[in-house]
Amino acid sequence: MLKTGFIGLGAMGAPMARYLRDAGLLTVVGNRTQAKADALAAELGVRSARSADNFADCDVVALCVSLDADVIENATALARVLKTGAVVVDHSTVSVQTARRVAALLAAEGIAFLDAPVSGGVEGARNGKLSVMVGGAEAALEKARPVIEAYAARISLMGETGAGQATKAVNQVLVAGINEAVCEGLALAEKLGLDAERLLPTLMAGAAGNWFLEKRGATMLRDAFAPGFKSVHMLKDLRIVQGIAREAGIRTATIDQAVADYAELVERGYGESDTSALIALKRKP
């Protein structure tokens, strides 16, 4: 049985860790805020990490943290303590360059790395139905597969290191574009006086149907913006995507508009709100 550690116990990480405990795989949890790690460890009956040393006996360590710097910091600490042949699985959304840097850092110590960002939101994490897009070696994925399967509906090996983050970049372009369209469309519906209870199922039954409309349409029309996926995190992701897209040499009108809109949303105090708070901008010219 694999011994697994999990670092990053936020809205996504905590339910993922619970699924690992239910699968009998979880040994230790860690978090920047120690009290949060202590509370979840007590709930799940596992160790609460005080330092990287507490992960030394793990075969797999999964990360779900916020920033590139967090991934690098954790990987650097783990590189000093994990045994040869261990696997670090990073579920964070970071740049392709960061994924490759971390992979090289760990490889120097005989530790495998998978960049494995996820999609599916808080609902996907809570329901154990995340889509996981993986970059790295197939052998490393097969070793870590029982861990990822604990909370995933789909696991896709997309290519070598960095391919997972590249796939997540594409994912976020589509998500951002859909968010823009849904929020703008529903703001228009409000101005036209359409009945939401009739409108939403009608839209969902046709070509306009999508996840964001289904999961967030009714709540955004009630000005209920509990995350979900925080707007400040979407802005962080989109700035990463913007750099990737510009380097690739494509037209970036959708990305640029989304970056500008989420930057304004954060500036107006909606950073901790769900991305559906975007409708607040769309309601005014």
Image (tube, helix red, strand yellow):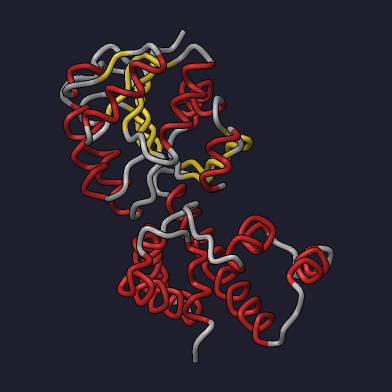
Closest to the observer, 259 or 275 = 275
Tell me residue 7's x, y (percent): 31, 31
- Numbered circles on residues, count: 0
Residue 244 in the figure: left or right of residue 37:
right
Q: Quadrant of residue 64?
A: top left
Tell me residue 120's x, y (percent): 57, 47
Tell me residue 73's x, y (percent): 18, 39
Residue at image location 45% in from the left, 80% down from the top: 257
Tell me residue 44's x, y (percent): 41, 16
Q: Which residue lies furthest to the bottom in this view?
A: 285
Above or below, 164 against 146 in this view is below
Residue 68 in the figure: left or right of residue 251:
left
Above or below, 45 against 35 in this view is above
Residue at image location 75% in from the left, 79% down from the top: 194
Above or below, 97 against 50 in this view is below
Residue at image location 42% in from the left, 51% down from the top: 165
Residue at image location 65% in from the left, 76% down from the top: 186
